[in-house]
Image: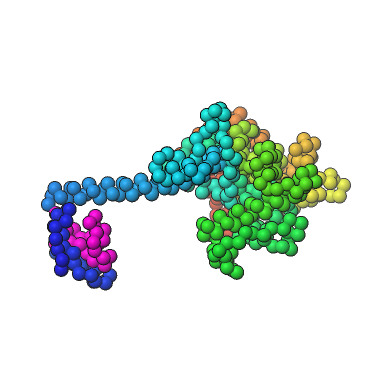
Amino acid sequence: VDGGQVCEGTSLVLPPCNAFLRRCLYETIEAEYPGLILERADNHPNGGAARNQIRVIRLSPAEKESRQTRIRLDEWHKLLQDTLGFTTVFRAISDACNGKSFTKERIEEFLEGRVRDPSVPDDAENGGIMTGRQIPIVIHNGLMDLMFLMTHCHHPVLPDEFEDTKKVIRKYFPCIYDTKILSSEYSDAVIQGGSSALGELYTVVCNDELNLDVPFKPPPIANQGADGATEQAHEAAWDAYMTGCVFSALCRRVIASKYRRVNGNVSLDSFLHNSRDDILRYSLGLNKIYMHMSLYTIDLESTSGPIGLHDPLTNGLSVETTFLVSGFNCSVSTRDILQSLMNVSRNEEELLQHLKYEIIWLNDTSLLVGTKVEEEVALESLANKNIIASHVRNKLHAGLGSVKILNLVEYFEDLKSRKELPVKPVSSGFAGSIFSGVKRALGLGEKRSSEEGGIEGQRRKRMRVG
């Protein structure tokens, strides 16, 4: 053995041995000599030993206190270094999204520790206006990813109010596209008629037979094999690659279908950076984010609207033509609802011939009926909204009897008048602010009796029809 005096107490480095024997030595020495400290020899500040050796240390009380102080400082500095590295990347991405510029010289100064930020400061001579272009953040169903970034790089606790949380996200990322929204709400019938899962979208946009008018060739990457999409799905780098490809391909399809006649062969880069925000919102869903298992599409720019409905309903639904139906018998099933609604004669309005429905059960005696029409139909027309509302009410009353039917605007106004509209979220934080108010207002999450309707009845009621 080789022993000697080092900076902390007296130490002894044991001979090299395999992992099994090292474990035996750790357990035996710690049991018989609890006053000694054992550690990997190569972890010691002075080093000089191999990874398969153990250092045994004997310390005085003062040396033990000094050692604990050193370990705490080392852990603290390591934490700061790790956090600083991630936060720096986050800040750089946020700066790029906010339109700040980056230069080679500035980044070199940052890496050398001469400046605090990697981006070029705002142009003071130009009134503080950013001199670069806003680089959009592209996500796919990325709400939870954004929340992770906010809680780890902004503050561990997000605001209680939903609207305040939206402002925080926009402060860091003022330009966001969600390919989940782009595919399900802003794309053509081929895309909307298929799955919006990332892997399946990627397969569709790379299929030459489905993209004859707007061909898309994904850029090659070094580690992409013949079956790379199957083997690498859900890995961060591969998912990011697929998200970028899907965004590029879907945007090209939208531009080709809506703007080619006006602007000729406008490039995606030119369209994204030279178009007004209202055009980008209308065409590509700028700053609209998908929220899983929700009636709503999160709109980061929306701060007003009907009571309780600052964010738009998802997937083409409208607050005026989405109805809360309650007060019917618990034996009613989804099939009964659809049979009543779809009982349309040829003599009725043509609009009603092509009406589609989405049935969402809240509990055994209440549900939501959402109505959707073809893209070409102007649902914004008050006359069309009145036709749909009258149709839904008449058909459901005829099929279900005396039931209560309110559209969502009427429902939330009714709650407000009775002072039952939740003002503060039941649970704290962002998630509570999203779900609790709507759940309380619409009765979501109420306990359902297993005796009412039976298991089969419950299964039929869980159906969601798009």
Task: Tell me: residue 18, above or below residue 443.
Answer: below
- Name the foreground residue: 118 vs 337: 118
Q: Quadrant of residue 230?
A: bottom right
**Residue sticking out furthest to the right:** 347
Q: Position of residue 48 (x, y in %)?
A: 23, 61
Which quarter of the rendering shows the N terminus? bottom left
Q: Residue at x 78, y 37 (%)?
A: 381
- Name the foreground residue: 330 vs 431: 431
Q: Position of residue 378 (x, y in %)?
A: 78, 41
- Name the foreground residue: 164 vs 422: 164
| Span highlighted in magenta in the image | 33-59
Q: Does the image show residue 255?
A: yes
**Residue sticking out furthest to the left:** 60
Q: Residue at x 41, y 47 (%)?
A: 85
Q: Position of residue 282 (x, y in %)?
A: 70, 41
Give the image's coloring scheme: rainbow
Q: Does the segment drawn in magenta span residue 253?
A: no
Q: Does the image show residue 315?
A: no
Q: Residue at x 69, y 62 (%)?
A: 207
Task: Tell me: residue 380, above or below residue 367.
Answer: above
